[in-house]
Image (cartoon, rainbow, N blue to C red):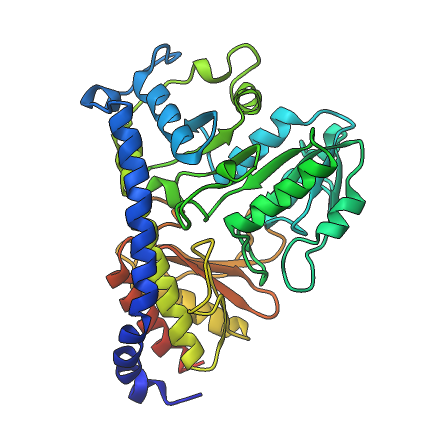
């Protein structure tokens, strides 16, 4: 390792000009996506009255319904369900699976083992009360190919007449695999449809929204889901998630979220929906800020000899930056530093502990305005070899720059 205290300022001065072409590409994507969102806002005549909440059953909630239409258009989908009633991205994903699958149906994950919290939803590793397997859903998975992409030959061999839903996880989750690009997802969906046209392609889109210039439902996916306190909330959405895709499938998920016969027609927004609209409008820019922070982190830590995924000069399809630190002490020190340089709860010291839905102790740094918001600068990871910390978010590149540089100084003492 180089002498970090002596070289850090010099490294920063060297890296920033070198990263400008990559930042320029991110900015161009943000401009394109902002234009798409703006066009949809104008087309659907967003007005002040759309920001007013509703109570009770929420009949005729114009703000809620208009936001559904806008998000569906932005995603290239027939229908969308954007609700603060979803408590997390995992909840939105589970709602889709429970809404579509029936006892005896098969769920096939084609991106290997899914994210930790989804494993408890599925319940295949250990029995989980209320899980899919407890309801008689069959689960299988196909490991990724050696190069980290989807093993299309393996998928072809695994598909059966019982395979109703294919689960495609776009992001890396707590793993070192590469995320799937929109082009990757298009190829996977196309191959599956050739083999089994009736099979439903379902994308876990968490961390991927607005990173590229289109979304999975515009590239062949039948349905997708994600969280509003990640990319599409723009750092302003206080809670919630979304489902978007084929109208019939979205409505099946809506009937699971509320009740059969009610579906998407009811559900009071309670408070004003301005933060959801404003967050969506800002989301392309906010995602760009997060990506710049991730690119800077990748370049800086690589210059210091750490293994980073992706590299600073590689294409990105999610906002997550993985840094292999090698020891639990370095993971904890990294998260301590990110927390200390947060605008909220900077005085709090993160400790590794058990978290619902995770099999290992997890250390998390999240000094965020919205609790658990991972479009705001945060870092976390399970304490298991090879001890990788996952950095994501950043409402401003300036904040990411300050916090990441400080984390490097912290690691000198480990």
Q: Is residue 280 visible?
A: no
Using the image, determine if residue 176 lies above or below residue 224: below
Question: Which residue is at 30% across, 21% downward?
Answer: 63
Question: Which residue is at 20% across, 23% downward?
Answer: 47
Q: Quadrant of residue 365?
A: bottom left
Percent position (x, y) of residue 301?
42, 75
Percent position (x, y) of residue 343?
26, 56
Of residues 49 and 73, the one drawn nearer to the viewer in this rendering: 73
Left/right of residue 250 with respect to residue 134 in the rendered view: left
The total number of labels drawn is: 0
Using the image, determine if residue 5 lies above or below residue 370: below
Percent position (x, y) of residue 298?
42, 70
Question: Which residue is at 60% across, 65% downward?
Answer: 384
Q: Quadrant of residue 19?
A: bottom left
**Residue sticking out furthest to the left:** 48
Using the image, determine if residue 55 lies above or below residue 250: above
Percent position (x, y) of residue 406?
31, 72
Question: Which residue is at 76% across, 51% downward?
Answer: 154
Q: Is residue 4 visible?
A: yes
Tell me the quarter of the image containing the C terminus.
bottom left
Of residues 128 and 236, the one drawn nearer to the viewer in this rendering: 236
Left/right of residue 224 with respect to residue 289 in the rendered view: right
Tell me the quarter of the image containing the N terminus.
bottom left
């Amino acid at each position: 390792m180089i002498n970090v205290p002596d070289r850090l300022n010099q490294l920063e001065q060297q890296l920033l000009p070198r990263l400008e072409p990559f930042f320029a590409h991110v900015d161009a994507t943000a401009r394109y996506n902002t234009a798409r969102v703006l066009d949809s806002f104008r087309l659907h005549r967003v007005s002040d009255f759309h920001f007013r909440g509703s109570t009770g059953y929420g009949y005729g909630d114009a703000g809620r319904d208009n936001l559904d239409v806008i998000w569906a258009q932005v995603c290239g989908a027939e229908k969308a369900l954007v609700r603060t009633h979803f408590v997390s991205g995992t909840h939105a994903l589970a709602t889709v699976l429970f809404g579509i699958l029936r006892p005896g149906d098969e769920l096939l994950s084609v991106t290997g083992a899914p994210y930790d919290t989804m494993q408890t939803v599925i319940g295949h590793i250990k029995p989980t009360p209320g899980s899919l397997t407890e309801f008689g859903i069959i689960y299988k998975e196909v490991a990724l190919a050696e190069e980290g992409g989807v093993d299309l030959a393996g998928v072809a061999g695994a598909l059966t007449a019982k395979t109703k839903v294919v689960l495609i996880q776009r992001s890396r989750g707590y793993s070192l695999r590469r995320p799937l690009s929109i082009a990757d997802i298009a190829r996977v969906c196309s191959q599956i449809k050739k083999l089994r046209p009736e099979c439903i392609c379902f994308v876990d889109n968490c961390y991927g929204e607005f990173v590229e210039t289109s979304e999975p439902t515009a590239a062949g996916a039948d349905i997708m889901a994600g969280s509003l306190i990640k990319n599409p909330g723009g750092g302003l959405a206080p809670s919630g998630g979304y489902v978007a895709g084929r109208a019939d499938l979205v409505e099946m998920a809506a009937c699971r979220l509320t009740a059969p016969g009610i579906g998407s027609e009811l559900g009071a927004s309670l408070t004003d929906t301005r933060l959801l609209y404003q967050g969506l409008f800002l989301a392309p820019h906010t995602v760009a800020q997060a990506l710049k922070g991730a690119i800077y982190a990748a370049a800086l830590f690589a210059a210091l000899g750490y293994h980073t995924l992706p590299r600073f000069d590689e294409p990105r399809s999610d906002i997550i930056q993985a840094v292999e630190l090698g020891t639990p002490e370095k993971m904890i020190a990294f998260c301590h530093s990110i927390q200390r340089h947060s605008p909220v709860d900077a005085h709090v010291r993160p400790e590794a502990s058990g978290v619902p839905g995770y099999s290992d102790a997890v250390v998390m740094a999240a000094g965020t305005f919205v609790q658990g918001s991972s479009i705001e600068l945060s870092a976390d990871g399970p304490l298991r070899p090879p001890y990788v910390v996952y950095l994501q978010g950043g409402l401003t590149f300036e904040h990411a720059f300050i916090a990441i540089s400080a984390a490097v100084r912290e690691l000198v003492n480990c």
